[in-house]
Image (spheres, rainbow, N blue to C red):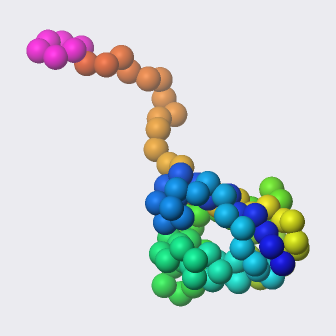
């Protein structure tokens, strides 16, 4: 069954720039395999060497995080929307500092 997969910007180089692709898959595991067959390198970006989803990648099926469903065994239905979302890190919780000026005190 065909599902729509939303591809994040950092992975679009592997999909020829496509922000969205359609694949045939019965569950998240077969979705990852289908994606990798069509767009080599995606599986390595999504899964570790043991085949588990990488900790910094979130996969949502119809806005539900698969970590709280059945992980890679989460079933898919025709017309589902799958979003791949890389975790975002960095930034500061504190007050922002003004930029330093060159050649002098801040």
Task: Give residue 73's quadrant in the image.
Answer: bottom right
Residue 31 at x, y percent in the picture = 70, 77
At x 59%, y 63%, the residue is 57
Residue 54 at x, y percent in the picture = 56, 71
Task: Give residue 85's quadrant in the image.
Answer: bottom right
* Residue 67 is at least partly visible in this image: no
Residue 96 at x, y percent in the picture = 44, 23
Q: Is residue 53 located in the magenta-colored stretch of the structure?
A: no
Taking depth in this image into account, of 80 and 15 the one nearest to the observer is: 15
Taking depth in this image into account, of 104 and 11 the one nearest to the observer is: 11
At x 25%, y 18%, the residue is 100
Looking at the figure, which quarter contains the N terminus? bottom right
Q: How many marks?
A: 0
* Residue 1 is at least partly visible in this image: yes
Residue occupying the far left of the picture? 103
Query: Taking 3 as reference, is 95 above or below it?
Result: above
Query: Taking 17 as reference, is 52 above or below it?
Result: below
Taking depth in this image into account, of 40 and 71 the one nearest to the observer is: 40
Predominant SS along the magenta part: loop
Q: Is 59 positioned to the left or the right of 103 in the image?
A: right
Q: Is residue 105 located in the magenta-colored stretch of the structure?
A: yes
The residues colored magenta run 101-106
Query: Taking 42 as reference, is 98 above or below it?
Result: above
At x 61%, y 54%, the residue is 19
Looking at the figure, which quarter contains the C terminus? top left
Residue 3 at x, y percent in the picture = 79, 69
At x 53%, y 52%, the residue is 9
């Amino acid at each position: 069954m065909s599902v729509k997969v939303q591809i994040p910007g950092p992975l679009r180089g592997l999909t020829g720039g496509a922000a969205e692709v359609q694949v045939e898959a019965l569950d998240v595991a077969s979705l990852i395999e289908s994606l990798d067959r069509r767009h080599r390198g995606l599986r390595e970006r999504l899964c570790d060497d043991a085949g588990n989803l990488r900790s910094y990648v979130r996969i949502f099926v119809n806005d539900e995080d698969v970590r709280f469903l059945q992980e890679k065994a989460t079933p898919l239905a025709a017309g589902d929307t799958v979003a791949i979302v890389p975790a975002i890190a960095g930034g500061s919780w504190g007050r922002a500092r003004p930029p330093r000026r060159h050649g002098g005190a801040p």
